[in-house]
Amino acid sequence: MSENEMKLSKMAGKQSILFSNPPCILSAASIAGKKEGEGPMGAQFDIIQEDPLLGKNSWEEAESELIKQAASKVLEKAGLKSADIRYLVGGDLLGQLIATSFGIADLEIPTIGIYGACSTMGEAMSVGAMLVDGGFAEKVLAITSSHFAGAEKQFRFPLDYGNQRPYSASWTVTGSGAVIIQDHNKYQKSNPEEVTIVIKGVTIGKIVDYGLKDSMNMGACMAPAAYETIKQNFEDFGVQPSYYDRIITGDLGYVGKNILIDLLKEKNYDISNNHMDCGIEIFDKDSQDTHAGGSGCGCSAIIFASYILKQLREKVWKRVLFIPTGALLSQVSFNEGKSVPGIAHAVIVEAE
Amino acid sequence: MSENEMKLSKMAGKQSILFSNPPCILSAASIAGKKEGEGPMGAQFDIIQEDPLLGKNSWEEAESELIKQAASKVLEKAGLKSADIRYLVGGDLLGQLIATSFGIADLEIPTIGIYGACSTMGEAMSVGAMLVDGGFAEKVLAITSSHFAGAEKQFRFPLDYGNQRPYSASWTVTGSGAVIIQDHNKYQKSNPEEVTIVIKGVTIGKIVDYGLKDSMNMGACMAPAAYETIKQNFEDFGVQPSYYDRIITGDLGYVGKNILIDLLKEKNYDISNNHMDCGIEIFDKDSQDTHAGGSGCGCSAIIFASYILKQLREKVWKRVLFIPTGALLSQVSFNEGKSVPGIAHAVIVEAE
């Protein structure tokens, strides 16, 4: 096979990539807020920050501090310095990605800023894995964050306004998750039994707009995008839902989860037995008053960087389809009466 | 050489990539506003829109229409449908990239949303070329936009406020530029004499913060980032300024240009003879009252997609270093008294 044919064979179906040399996840870090620490996943996170301001003067600075700590932690866990990372791929929910740019500037890593709303971790891991598999980097840092108070101020109302939240509303997670993606050929197992986690492939999502306009019901806005990406993943790789031990969406919450399962059932795909949603898992709905569930870039990122990777490392699951989901609204588009389109990027993660 | 060694050899120096199979630029399109059409580059653009609202109800919708028209035009010029494009890489200046997401949703192309402020065209072309050279796509659409009125509203004051502008302020360009990047092996020349334009390599920039805080003097904020990226490009490829026929920055304007040239001179690099800045070229300073020059993602994008490519196709220039420059501020970071960090990504474009 010529070099060109070899390269072309990475393209799977219409929207997906099957890596020729699947990059591995060298380390991961999760920094969570107090409420997230009190939830069912609390014990999984590396660091829990009790102070929502993290000692800073604004919510935005607090979020930058979250992302800075996640970057430090993921480097520390891998025994690396920032100079060992060739490229950083990351972003957040704030306008012009200020949480990320102020959080990571000191690291001095060449940076590819991305925006996919709450799908950002899926986008960061997809682009990061492509950079590594394409031979453009040996190590890439994929990172994202969100902050409850910063997101409410950005998209809805400042907390001081005391706005009431409908039951369809989700609760933006305060947290930052990071992973280092590395060339598999450069990976040294610490012992022969060590389980390696690899990114086998990705499915890049389209913007999907069913015309919904309710920024207090983002699960419903994002479910169609998750549906399109998951269906395309099944088609591009010629697999059924049972191919995956878990199909894990980002932050559809209770409302979006049901819509997703129903949409896929109409196409004869039943994911009800192996679907999980990070937004549902992160909070206890009854005791934590979080309504439809958790959301925000940080939601799927910290669950992936902790619980999901742990289940894979322990081989409870061997193959996971991870699909962070994003709602592409801004306060301006919402105030101008526009719809809330969604996007979702899927990453196939395997234990081997 | 093994596959792995071949792949690793794409990494040039600390931050750069030298493509093993340099992707080519299949087609390009530029849509400009009225003021841009009246400037010295007016005759170069594909379409000039006289109506700043483009028949829409808001500045944001107008910008989405600009980006939609640029996408249509670049597809039309290449004789392609949107389904022929595997991935779209793009973004804009508005919070949460709403100009892009509402502008391109109808195309139904899998999308990688990016943000690099006014460096976005450099980032889009860099990521796009990596996706093609990495074997992940045969054709990628790289696109960006900006709109004067939308940007003033987003970053400074709504036009109706009648704010005065200092001489160091730049004028955000109304326009959208797009290029289709294609696998070179799949490129068919229309005739043997046709000049092919290839992306030879890229240098991904770091976030550079010299502590400047003036959002009305973005040239000064961005010049250090341009300096760091250009210097790194010279070092990574072991070349001198004369290696390039033109070194073309995005939107430093008159203030930033002088700072850039001075900073490089301190390192014994003299680019004063072959430097050009899109922000300086796009407007006539005296007759158009644009103070420090043009800026915005659209500025370097439409100049690249028209004039720069034309000079390369006619072999007036054979090798260009194109460095769109971005200022990483938001209205929130500015109001909270933060500095304005910069970022710049460099793309080596050659005629062959």
Image (cartoon, coloured by chain):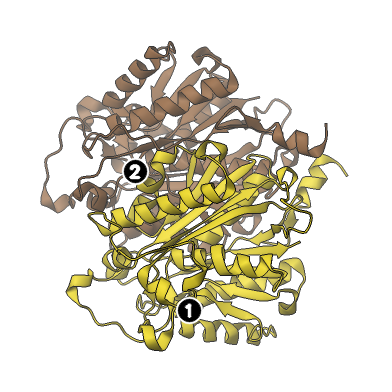
Chain colours: A yellow, B brown
Q: Is residue B318 visible?
A: yes
Q: Using a 10 Å C-alpha cutoff, classify the residue at mark 2 as few (fewer than 14 neighbours), some (14 to 19) or many (20 or more).
A: many
Q: Please, is residue B313 above or below residue A251 in the view?
A: above
Q: Is residue A340 left or right of residue B211?
A: right
Where residue B255 appears, as percent x and y from the top left, is 26, 25
Front position in the image: A36 or B183: A36
Q: For the point 17% across and 50% down, which residue is it?
A: B157
- Please identify the residue farthest to the right as the structure is shown: A1
Q: Position of residue A168 (x, y in %)?
A: 38, 84
Q: Tell me if B156 is positioned left or right of B327 in this view.
A: left
Q: Nearer the viewer, residue A247 or A314?
A: A314
Callout 1, which amino acid?
Pro
Q: Which residue is mark 1?
A: A40
Q: Which mark is residue A307?
A: none
**Quadrant hosting residue B214:** top left
Disc 2, SS: loop
What residue did someone put label 2 on? B328
Quadrant in the rendering for residue B17: top right
